Image (cartoon, rainbow, N blue to C red):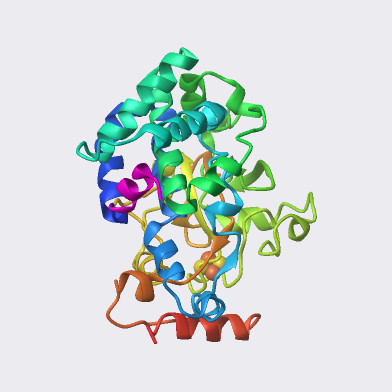
Amino acid sequence: MTNLESYLANYTETDWLAALDELLPCIHEVDKNAIQIWFRFYPLSLKRFIDAAEDREATLHGLAMQGVFELKDQIDTSHHFLYGHRYWKTVKAAIEAEAAVFTDQKHDLKEEVKQIGILVAEKLKVERSLVNAIVLVGLMTLNQVGLEAFNAATGEVEKPSGIMTKSPDAIVAERAKDDSQGVFGFLKTVNKKFSVTYTAANSSGKFPLLNEQEITAASANDRSQDWQSLDSRCWEGPVPVECTAASCGTCWVGVLGGQEKMTEVGRRERRAMKVFGYNQTDDATPFMRLACQARAMGNVTLVIPPWNAVFGKKVYNNIEEVELEPNTTSAKALRETIASATTGE
Ligand code: FES
């Protein structure tokens, strides 16, 4: 292990999240939610829990793990939804160079990110606030995959497309906008229509949403593609879904823009997020949501994670007892696995 790897390995998930919080003022608005979501999508504690397991397969089964969850399988792509994704090749090279010379273990994680950020920003001639988030991603990725796998990734990324071709400020403004309701829009009450823009590992696009409709209900109406061929967790529409009742954890999403235009988190969603292990903040309208519970009253921009699981009890021991309220009949085996995943046994 290099010095840089052992330095990074000293930090817990809580330390990383604290460093991220301290760095937020130095991160451009365009990536503020994105970086916080990325850290929720790839939790270090879960990675360490799985690595420490004696029987890995049984552990994954016990956590009801579905989809692609390991960073080693997506070193160049996990951060596709960050503006800073376009700088990945340079960031990756800067971290590799740092790994070759790193000796100073005295300064903190935040300083380490800033130092690499300065070098990258100078090289690319861009604002530092646009690179700090992707540098953080790079260091955590190195921490989770090890230098050998990190070096082996090509660093190549696809060119930005759609809204991501605009300037950072224009992207922020675009995400805040709602669809026009027409000349007489001010007269409309219940029949307002909005758009949900989403990005996922294998797809991206937009679907319409009626005012105050649940995100999964709106997603289900999008029959434009064979969603299951893109992601086996997608039964109807681009948002993965199973129970539609806050009981399985399949439909978790990050909110890149418009979180304040969503309904407030209710008791059921709040508790379910803890059971699943998804790190939702205490805000009334946080940036991590269950799409089957959250409704929107305006345009929102979402990112869909490539996996889901139930690990709150086993990894964080964050719940005393579990009130599981499964009320669908379509996936008995999955529900049984989830029931065992939440007992902590
Ligand atoms: S679909 Fe099961 S929790 Fe939302």
Task: Examine the image and state in which quarter residue 14 appears.
Answer: bottom left
* Extreme-top residue of the structure: 125
| Image-based side of 235 in relation to 253, left or right | right
Say above or below: 270 vs 174. below
Front in this rendered view, residue 115 or 316:
115
Residue 281 appears in the figure: yes
Residue 242 versus residue 206 in the image, above or below: below
Say above or below: 101 vs 8.
Answer: above
> Is 220 inside the magenta-drawn segment?
no
In the image, what residue occupies the spot 80% across and 56% down?
226
The magenta stretch is 1-10
How far across and how far down the image is residue 314, in percent? 37, 76
Query: Residue 262: where, in percent of width, then height?
Result: 44, 48
Locate residue 84, reporting x and y percent: 49, 29
Q: Name the quarter where the C terminus is drawn.
A: bottom left
In the rendered picture of this protein, how many numbered marks are placed on residues? 0
Please report the residue visible at 79 percent of the width from the left and 49 percent of the height from the top: 224
Q: Give the quadrant of residue 244.
A: bottom right
Name the residue at 60% across, 47% down: 209
Magenta span includes 2: yes
